[in-house]
Amino acid sequence: MYRKIDDFMQSWDYEAKGTQKILDALTDQSLSQAVAKDHRTIGRMAWHLVTTIPEMMGHTGLSVGGADPHSLTPADAATIKKSYAAVAKALGDEVRAKWQDAALEVEDNMYGETWKRGVTLTALLMHQAHHRGQLTVLMRQAGLRVPGVYGPALEEWSQYGQPAPPV
């Protein structure tokens, strides 16, 4: 649970950049890739990341703007990339402008439970990392190059002058 706005903002800035890297690697053709029939596609999962930020943070009283969580998934990757960048920035701006450290102890109704805002911010980051991981698997299935977030991805080791670890 976050107890200081600065600590969250440091994490958010890093995590949002990582998510943007993943989204920036998407193509229009890749958006229909799913692990199996009747499962989320890359496009739907990426759009879910975009729409969750305003939806979840709306429960805390922040107004992040962005797409409705029930809106249709855009047919083009550029809209998803641009929309994520906008809501990620808006979240940072809202938190910095409207909350002080004490606000992280305030409790809100979150999906039938009571969460401190510091917990909500932690859940938002973990939710994003979870779906980012799912996206990278689908991206490999779609033949896309996956960018590293917490270290080099398979294709990036050579940039560090090292061979990729053995499989």
Image (cartoon, grey):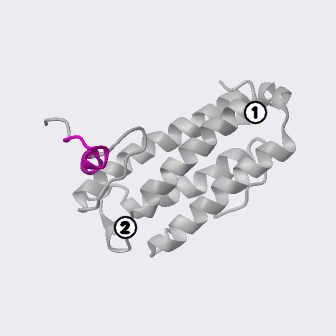
Which image quarter holds the C terminus? top left
**Closer-to-camera residue (142/12):** 12
The answer to whether residue 92 is magenta is no
Tag 2 or tag 1, which sits nearer the N-term? 1
Q: Tell me if 52 is positioned left or right of 128 in this view.
A: right
Most extreme residue toward the front is: 161
Which segment did they paint magenta?
154-163
Label 1 amino acid? Ile
Within the magenta stretch, is there residue 157? Answer: yes
Which quarter of the picture shows residue 120?
Answer: top right
Comparing 156 with 11, the one in front is 156
Q: Does residue 41 sit above or below 75 in this rendering? A: above
**Which residue bears the numbered disc 2?**
31
- Residue 163: in sight, yes or no? yes
Query: Does the rendering let one see residue 116?
Result: no
* Quadrant location of the N terminus in the rendered image: top right
Type of secondary structure dominating the magenta stretch: helix
Q: Residue at x 57, y 68 (%)?
A: 82
Residue under label 1: 5
Side of 17 where 130 appears, left or right: left
Task: Tell us which disc is closer to us: 1 or 2.
Answer: 1
What's the amino acid at mark 2?
Leu
